[in-house]
Image (cartoon, helix red, strand yellow):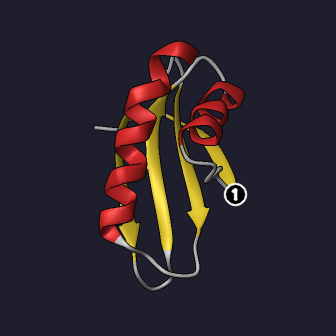
Amino acid sequence: MPLYMDVHRMDAIDPDALAGAHERDLEVQERFGVDYRSYWYSHQPARVFCLVDAPDPESATAVHREAHGLVADEIYEVRQGG
């Protein structure tokens, strides 16, 4: 299954809210055949990065949309290096 990294441009980062949003992703992901593996964030600039196994970008986006409404600004297919 393809691996994607999505990018969310935020105004500010609330680590507790992000953890809650990730938990909601995990609750609904199976319905879309998706596996949200992990996420990272930075405060300056305020960005969130999610790593996800998904059949396609639309399925990954559908999970975010249903779980909490915070859809990514960008999504890239990536490959893991050494």
Q: How many numbered dots are placed on residues in this image?
A: 1
Residue found 34% across the figure and 41% down from its top = 23
- Does 68 appear above or below 10? above
Mark 1: amino acid: Asp
Residue 24 in picture, x, y percent from top left: 42, 39
Quadrant where the C terminus lies?
Answer: top left
Residue 47 in picture, x, y percent from top left: 50, 70
- Does 66 appear above or below 68? above
Label 1: how many Cα within 10 Å (few below 14, some 14–19, many 20+): few
Residue 4 in picture, x, y percent from top left: 54, 36
When asked about the image quadrant of residue 40, the answer is bottom left
Viewer-closest of 75 and 29: 29
Residue found 30% across the figure and 65% down from its top = 16
Is 53 situated left or right of 63 in this image?
left
- Does 11 appear above or below 68? below
**Residue furthest toward the bottom?**
44
Q: Element at badge 1?
A: loop
